[in-house]
Amino acid sequence: MTGEGIKKKKDPIFSVCFVVFVVACVGVIGVYVDEHYIQQDDTKVAYGDKVVTNYTGSFYAYYGEDNAVVFDTSYASIGKNDDVAKAYSFSKSSYSTFSVTVGSNGALKMFEDSLVGHKVGDKIRVMIPASEGYIASDGAMKIGQSTTFDVDMVQTMSYTQFKEIYSKDLTAGVSATITTAYGWTGIAALSNADNMVTITNLPTAGQTYQYIGNDDSKYGKVSFQVNSVSDVVKVTMSLEGTTAVSGGIQMVKVNVDGNAFYITGYNGTTFDYKTCPETYNADLYFEIEIVSINA
């Protein structure tokens, strides 16, 4: 006996209903996917919206342009790329998007304002001038300083500051011969009483010394010519290998006494510098991509 004799005939009404049911399900699922997973509408950012972004912030120019130096980014592909010029302060171990409610002052105002009117997928460029960015306290900017200046024969700094510059341990009460930040020889002594370090400078008049931070200096090399040695050391500072940008040069970080500063301008006889962080009192260039709006 074959199986044909026990097969039931298909009910045509059932078949039609089943097809209608399947089509309806496909339609409902399609609407759900479109609404929840495919943002193809023209919704634009307005004040009060929560916006998720990816971004790259740089000095001097937008990322990818000549002389741009990245100080922050949400992209691991940029942050982990050693070929991308980075700021001295750049240090990230993880990367993620940045969320901000527009108008909440959760970011720089011009950063938030630049998002308004844009939709998901839009890429935005905004340059935030120093006056609208991170503003340092009065006195942080020094303009037109002479490249010839005096260095005390004996300098004092905290042990923490000393280790930041020299990455060297000292034993209290035991003097150590070091190469000072200026490049000449010195004697360092740690006081057990107040955890302070005294450095006695021992330069030779007429010699030119290289700043010990030059190996880590990305945007210029610093040297100190010793003009005379008496109760003070009179030196003339020089810079080489700098890159001219609008308003000065790419910042060169220097730390000779435990207080880092950034040289922002140099003409051979005078220099400008700031004692605040890199991102303060600086034009900031942002490239922003909108990932989602009120998602």
Image: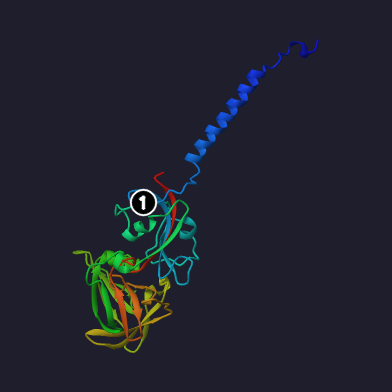
The colouring scheme, among rainbow, by chain, secondary structure or one colour, is rainbow
28 or 77: nearer the viewer: 28
Secondary element at image label 1: loop
Which quadrant, please, contains the C terminus? top left
Q: Is residue 252 toward the left or the right of residue 26 in the image?
A: left
Which residue type carries mark 1? Answer: Ala
**Residue at point 67% right, 16% down?**
11
Q: Is residue 222 toward the left or the right of residue 138 in the image?
A: right
**Pointer 1 local density, CA inside 10 Å: few below 14, some 14–19, many at least 20:** some
**Residue at point 29% right, 54% down?**
105
Q: Position of residue 221 (x, y in %)?
A: 40, 78
In the image, residue 112 sits, relative to residue 269, either above or below, namely above
Q: Is residue 160 toward the left or the right of residue 72 in the image?
A: left
Q: Position of residue 231 (x, y in %)?
A: 21, 85
200 or 251: nearer the viewer: 251
Q: Hey, which quadrant is residue 70 in on the image?
A: bottom left
**Residue at point 45% right, 72% down?**
67
Residue 171 in view (yes/no) = no
Q: Position of residue 191 (x, y in %)?
A: 22, 67
Q: Residue furthest left?
A: 193
The residue to which callout 1 is attached is 46
Residue 159 in view (yes/no) = yes
